[in-house]
Image (cartoon, helix red, strand yellow):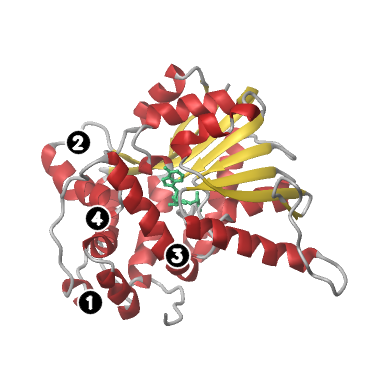
């Protein structure tokens, strides 16, 4: 794939470019079953994670540009780390915490929490490829920290790789099974972290119940995600939300109050109310739309069939949804 560099977006709010015009696909096809959707999500991340790494870097989440000054000068990489810092600020997850990073991508957040905060982090993802990449990237970072000529990185008996004062491991696991899988850790974890993964899960109530199970008393659930606005009319839904759900492989999106209800129903208390940061993250999709004006990426998407093209087309809908206010982004935290 050709090298891609970050650049100032040149395109308008909902611009169809010459490149994107070559590929048009009908939107709004329903996901047939939730298991079929999960299989497509796994396949998507198995196939696309190398591209994510090239385009976005090690974090597969939005950037956060909190001020005008940040919007003018911060790169997407700085802004992505600033989103993690915001999540730490609203959750007060402390040094040395035992964390479950649910839907961990290629491990950017897990490594950050281990290196910067000395956390012990287990990252889980549904993608085999992401476990492989996350482990490889972690070993490479750990090797840099070893003094002397022998840079061999050996995981401990539980599979953790030492990083800074913390440690990290990655497991392939459908998060909907985490309650059973981590049954022996029930009531012991300091934090469950979930950044831009819950919107992929069909059964959101189950996730909150599982988080409650694995957290210790006083433990935190830290969450960043995508939402639909409240009280949208059918036209707003059809034009803005449906293409996002369709292209980004999402079951029906929730509103922010929906998540609060799921959490409190599961027995969690609100630690930090939803903070809507849509206007401070939307720049992500201006940059992304600019980045994907790369013929090799469209060719790759096209080779993946309808899902690949619908994915890239959803970028436009994301920008439109943010600008209309129908699509929202928020962070929040809860406590057991
Ligand atoms: C947008 S990425 C976010 C990655 C990461 N949290 C970050 O912030 O960089 C979504 C992640 O959710 C994971 N995911 C989606 N559905 C999942 C499931 N049912 N179980 C586990 N992981 C899942 C994907 O594999 C992917 O790693």
Q: Residue at x 50, y 17 (%)?
A: 267
Q: Is residue 173 left or right of residue 34?
A: right
Q: CA distance from mark 3 to mark 1?
A: 20 Å
Residue 317, label in figure: 4
The residue nearer to you, when weighing 282 against 193, is 193
Q: Secondary structure at mark 2?
A: loop
The residue nearer to you, when weighing 210 against 58, is 210
Q: Residue at x 76, y 50 (%)?
A: 156
Q: Secondary structure at mark 3?
A: helix
Q: CA distance from mark 3 to mark 2?
A: 31 Å
Nearer the N terminus, badge 1 or badge 2?
1
Q: Is residue 162 above or below residue 226?
A: below
Nearer the N terminus, badge 1 or badge 4?
1
The C terminus appears in which quarter of the rendering?
top right
- In the rendered structure, are the residues bearing label 3 and label 1 in contact, judged by CB atoms less than 8 Å apart? no
Q: CA distance from mark 2 to mark 4?
A: 15 Å
Asked whether the viewer can see residue 122, the reply is yes
Q: Can you give x and y, in whole percent of width and height, for residue 246 in the image?
A: 23, 50
Residue 52, label in figure: 3
Nearer the N terminus, badge 3 or badge 4?
3
Q: Which residue is mark 2?
A: 232
Q: Residues within 10 Å of mark 2 (few under 14, many from 20)?
A: some
């Amino acid at each position: 794939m050709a090298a891609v560099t970050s650049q100032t977006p040149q395109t308008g709010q909902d611009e169809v470019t010459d490149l994107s015009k070559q590929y048009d696909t009908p939107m709004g096809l329903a996901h047939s079953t939730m298991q079929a959707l999960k299989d497509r999500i796994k396949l998507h991340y198995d196939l696309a994670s190398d591209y994510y790494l090239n385009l976005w870097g090690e974090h597969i989440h939005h950037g956060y540009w909190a001020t005008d000054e940040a919007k003018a000068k911060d790169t997407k990489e700085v802004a992505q780390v600033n989103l993690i810092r915001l999540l730490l600020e609203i959750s007060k997850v402390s040094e040395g915490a035992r964390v479950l990073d649910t839907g961990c991508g290629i491990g950017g957040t897990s490594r950050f929490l281990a290196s910067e905060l000395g956390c012990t982090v287990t990252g889980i993802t549904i993608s085999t490829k992401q476990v492989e990449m996350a482990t490889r990237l972690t070993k490479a970072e750990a090797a840099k920290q070893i003094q002397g000529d022998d840079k061999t990185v050996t995981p401990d008996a539980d599979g953790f790789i030492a990083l800074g004062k913390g440690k990290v491991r990655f497991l392939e696991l459908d998060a909907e099974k985490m309650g059973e899988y981590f049954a022996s850790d029930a009531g012991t974890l300091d934090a469950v972290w979930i950044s831009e993964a819950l919107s992929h899960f069909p059964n959101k109530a189950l996730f909150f119940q599982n988080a409650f199970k694995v957290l210790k008393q006083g433990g935190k659930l830290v969450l960043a995600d995508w939402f639909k606005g409240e009280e949208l009319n059918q036209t707003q839904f059809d034009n803005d939300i449906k293409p996002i759900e369709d292209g980004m492989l999402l079951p029906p999106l929730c509103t922010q109050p929906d998540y609060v209800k799921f959490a409190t129903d599961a027995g969690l208390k609100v630690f930090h109310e939803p903070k809507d940061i849509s206007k401070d993250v939307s720049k992500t999709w201006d940059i992304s739309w600019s980045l994907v004006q790369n013929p090799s990426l469209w060719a790759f998407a096209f080779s993946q069939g309808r899902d690949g093209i619908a994915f890239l087309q959803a970028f436009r809908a994301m920008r439109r949804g943010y600008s209309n206010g129908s699509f929202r982004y928020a962070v929040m935290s809860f406590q057991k």
